[in-house]
Image (cartoon, rainbow, N blue to C red):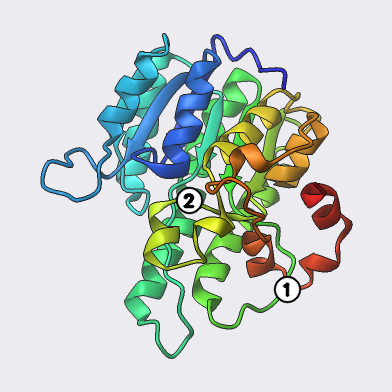
Amino acid sequence: MEEPDLEGSTAFITGTTRGIGKEIALALAENGCNIVSTGKTVDDSESDLEGTIHKTAEACREKGVEAHAIQLDVRDPENVHSSVEEAIDEFGEVDTVINNASAIQIANVKQLPADRFDLMTEVNVRGTYLVNRAFLPHLKEIGGGWILSNSPPVNTDRSPGKAAYAWSKMGMSFVTLSLDGELARHDIGCNTFWPLTAIDTRATRYFGLGTEDDWREPRIVADAVLEILKRDPAECSGNSFYTEELLREAGVEDFSEYNVVEGSDPDPMSAVMFDPDFESEDVIRDSFDG
C-alpha cells in the first residue's frame, strides 16, 4: 500500500495507552504525524497491564516525530477543554482528532448495573461529543481537518445481550456523522471506522469474545486509518467505513497477514455484533475471499 505523507500534521488521539489507540498513534508517527497521546494511565508500575500515555508518546518520538502526553478523562468537560487547549498551545495546529477511547461491558439488560450503563454512555458517547465539540473552533479556524471515531455503522435498532454497549458505540457514530452536516462548509472530514472481525485487545480477551482464531491484529485498524488520511477531508466525509473495505480499495487482497493465528479464517464478529444481517451483504464476500 502507498503510505500517506503526514509530515506537518498533528493528531490528538484518545485512549493511546495500549491496543488499537497505541497502534494508530505509532502508525501515524511512522508516516510523519506529530502525536498527542491521551488517556488516563500515567503509571503502570503497580498494574498487570503495561502501557501509559507517556510510553506511547516516547515510542512515537523514536519514530522521529514530536509527541506530547496529556492525562485525559473524556468524561470531564473541564479536563477535555484544558487538554485541547494544551495540545493546541504545544503544536500550534491540531488537524486530526481521533476518538478511540472506549468503555466496554458485554451483558444483557438484567445483568448490567446502571452505573456500568452510565460509564459506557459517558466515555463513549459523551466523551466523543465533548472532544469533538472542544475542537470545532480550532478546526474551523485552521480551515479543515479530520474528525474520526472508532465506531460502527448505525445499521440496527436492537442488540440483544449487549444493548448498552451497542447503544454507546453507535452513539459515537451518530455524533460524528451528524457533524458532517453541521460542518459541510468547513472542509472537515467526519467519518467512522470499524473492523469486520474482532481485534486482539485487552477487552476482547477479558470478555472472551471468541478465541485467537477469531481475531485480527490492531494493525489492521491503524492501516485503515492511514487510508482515510490519504484522502481529501473536503471530499471524504459522512462515511462509516469498514477497515477491510478501505484496505481492499487500497489493493490488499490477502488479509491473512493481519490474523493473530496463522492459517485461521476469522468470522466478521465485530460487524455482526452491530448488524445481524451483515452476512448477506456483498462486502463480506469481497473482504473474505481467499
Disc 1 residue crowd, few under 14, some 14–19, many 20+, Cα 10 Å: some
Residue 260, percent from left and from top: 53, 47
Name which residue lies at 66% across and 17% down: 4
Query: Between 210 and 191, which is closer to the camera in this rendering?
Result: 210
Q: Residue furthest bottom?
A: 110
Please name the residue that numbered disc 2 is placed on. Answer: 200
- Residue at x 68% of width, y 67% of height: 272
Q: Is residue 7 above or below residue 80?
A: above
Q: Are marks 1 and 2 in contact (CB under 8 Å)?
A: no
Residue 174 place in picture, x, y as percent: 65, 57
Residue 107 is drawn in which quadrant?
bottom left
Q: Earlier in the sequence, mark 1 or mark 2?
A: 2
Asked whether residue 68 is in view, the answer is: no
Disc 2 marks a residue whose amino acid type is Asp
Q: Using a 10 Å C-alpha cutoff, classify the residue at mark 2 as few (fewer than 14 neighbours), some (14 to 19) or many (20 or more).
A: many
Q: Which residue is mark 1?
A: 276
Q: Quadrant of residue 282?
A: bottom right
Name the image quarter holding the N terminus. top right
Would you say residue 70 is visible in this rendering? yes
**x then y, percent, for residue 81:** 37, 38
The residue positioned farthest toward the front in the image shown: 263
Going by the image, does 71 lie left or right of 177? left
Q: Nearer the viewer, residue 272 or 131?
A: 272
| Residue furthest out toward the right | 282
270 vs 103, left or right, is right
In this rendering, would 107 be left or right of 5?
A: left
Q: Name the residue at 53% across, 23% down.
A: 28
Left or right: residue 86 versus residue 254 is: left
Give above or below for 38 relative to 110: above
Q: Secondary structure at mark 1?
A: loop
Measure how far apart labels 1 and 2 are at the Cα level: 22 Å
Residue occupying image coordinates x 42% and y 43%: 19
